[in-house]
Amino acid sequence: MTSIKDVARLAGVSTATVSRTLSKPDKVAETTRNKVMQAVEQSGYVANTLARNFRRRRTNTVVVLVPDITNSFFSNIIQSIESVAHDNGYRILLVDMQNKPERALEYGELVAQRQADGIISLGKTIPFKYRAGRKSIDPKWPPFVMVCEYDGMIPVPTVCIDNLNAAREAVDYLIALGHRRIAYINGPENSPLCLDRIKGYRQAMKAVGVSNTRSLVFNGDFSLDAGREAMTAILNSEDPLPTAVFCANDAMAIGALQCIKARGLSVPGDISLMGFDDIKFSAYCDPPLTTVRQPRNRIGEVAMQRMLDLLHERHVPNAREMLPHELVLRQSTAALVAGE
Amino acid sequence: MTSIKDVARLAGVSTATVSRTLSKPDKVAETTRNKVMQAVEQSGYVANTLARNFRRRRTNTVVVLVPDITNSFFSNIIQSIESVAHDNGYRILLVDMQNKPERALEYGELVAQRQADGIISLGKTIPFKYRAGRKSIDPKWPPFVMVCEYDGMIPVPTVCIDNLNAAREAVDYLIALGHRRIAYINGPENSPLCLDRIKGYRQAMKAVGVSNTRSLVFNGDFSLDAGREAMTAILNSEDPLPTAVFCANDAMAIGALQCIKARGLSVPGDISLMGFDDIKFSAYCDPPLTTVRQPRNRIGEVAMQRMLDLLHERHVPNAREMLPHELVLRQSTAALVAGE
DNA sequence: CTGTTAGCGCTTTCAC
DNA sequence: GTGAAAGCGCTAACAG
């Protein structure tokens, strides 16, 4: 392997000059620079990033913690993170948590071990130790950004949407269509994001006089199967059927959709159905799914941007930065026909 | 930052002993080991991986090149790669090629730069320079494994399925149902994997006397939209409608499905539809999609296993290792009714 | 089993 | 503008 020494010898300069030429070319006289570049060319020299990173004490690598990489909701976010990272000379170390948040702390160590310069988490767990209720994060924490989820206990730079109001608007829309008996298929109960969405749902319901929603709320884990199962529970319940069902994500809505149709009921004829996220498949359902769009690519971009800000020691507020969501009206929802 | 020296001093031993205790504990006397571990504990020492990697000349990191991370077909493969990697002390550096194979060479350099120990590519492009037609790979290449795709020009360790026979079996199944006018929506024409699949399609058609399939073959790029567009072209064509359509992947089949239903035609009543891959959504279509299952998790596992073999200098044949596929019969295909 | 020693390849003062 | 020299923190001979 040719090293910086070989290049130096070949160009007849010192290793320091080679190093400078490569990292700060403008600090080197043009003739010297040319000599060095030619020697680099000729020897096929490629800098050893390991040595460089070691010396510079940085990796130009950012860890991305993904709760479940097979959940297609995350893929656009990851794509944008990767893209912005790439454009700024950073690489992504991908960690699939496989929905095991207890492994988070293990990955928090990656920065201490110098495997990465910072951590972006798409999940709800903070990969560092902290005392609940603290007003601010430990100043010794490495650059850290949360995406979509957040931990209410401690303020951390977060990029997400306004889940409460997004859910509220979704349910308000169903209400405007005349629905009152609206079931809600929620995600994992311990997820702050889901707490916000259910709060939005409850607010909207309460505004039209439905304050006890207990029998209308079902839980799932964001998977297609969970949607089917929750919908089965709804259809099997002895309570009167809801006229609309709002789901905490599109995958569960698609699972629910299949279940409804399998029972011989129609969407939106018998039941209006609404999802959340606007994943690609939602436009290809039958009927296409009314949903709430999250600007996933934008979320990823902003998240990586904030990470770069932190890495460059620019100020980033320890607060949630909310990006605009959008109601996407398709054909899975319809006005409640009078008398139904 | 506490370094190995601090620990050595605290434990009253040499840095070499600390290093040994941490990497080969069995080579150290128990009493010494205890002293060291206690010092580690007490000082909160975390080894600097950058220094360690630099010294060991390895990163325990493998680059995974993904053509398009938003294509959900890849996510299970990545998940398994990551999982096996993690269990063996490796990390994954994720690169999203965004379908720009020309960037491959840039990433091939990552190993030369010591950013990674090996490369797994899920795409069709080899990220190293090579002369076409060589019998064997350049012995100077770093550990490299291809997944799903392969490059016919040069033999490289590859983990995939038997695309030719899988496609052939799929079409044979449609033929057994009585179909003869079977259209094919292919993926990118320059993909070896697609060349195999179309070969399988043609073989099956030829076996029942259809040797000119030109007007039956359409191209797409594996996306939902491409499926819709290809299907639109089929339906708008002046030729008689096919009674069955085989798609090179499920996403295009789902796109085609929507298009067919939008025209007021029924699947499988008017047109039988068959996909490829068996992604999660396929079971949730209406009707659920008949398809060919690729063992995606297994593919990822085996691929990372082969990478580990290469990294440990075990022999890995420069050949394709084909994993078993499986026909998944659902409701999007039906026997051709006589007289149709 | 343990300590001494010599770097890995690069960057970065600090002189000149 | 350039070179000499001193490490970064760790590991791996080697000797004892």
Image (tube, coloured by chain):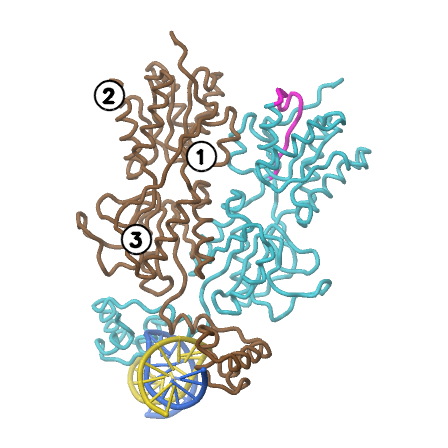
Chain colours: A cyan, B brown, C blue, D yellow
B335 relative position to A68: left or right: left
Of the 4 image quadrants, the one containing the C terminus of chain B is top left
The residue identified by callout 2 is: B212
Residue closest to the far top? B339
Residue A272 among magenta residues: yes
Viewer-side label of 2, 1: 1
Q: Which residue is mark 3?
A: B127
The 10 Å Cα crowd at callout 3, few under 14, some 14 to 19, many 20 or more, is: many
Under mark 3, the amino acid is Pro
Mark 2 closeness class: few <14, some 14–19, many ≥20 residues within 10 Å: few
Q: Which sits in the foreground, B136 or B237?
A: B136
Above or below, A197 relative to A147: above
Q: Marks 2/3: CA distance?
A: 37 Å
* Residue A169 sits above or below residue A106 on the image: above
Give the side of residue A156 with respect to residue A133, left or right: left
Q: Which mark is residue B313?
A: none
Which element is circle 2 on? loop
Question: Where is mark 1, residue-wise?
Answer: B278
Seen in the picture, residue A328 relative to B113 is either above or below; the reply is above
Chain of residue at mark 2: B
Residue B338 among magenta residues: no
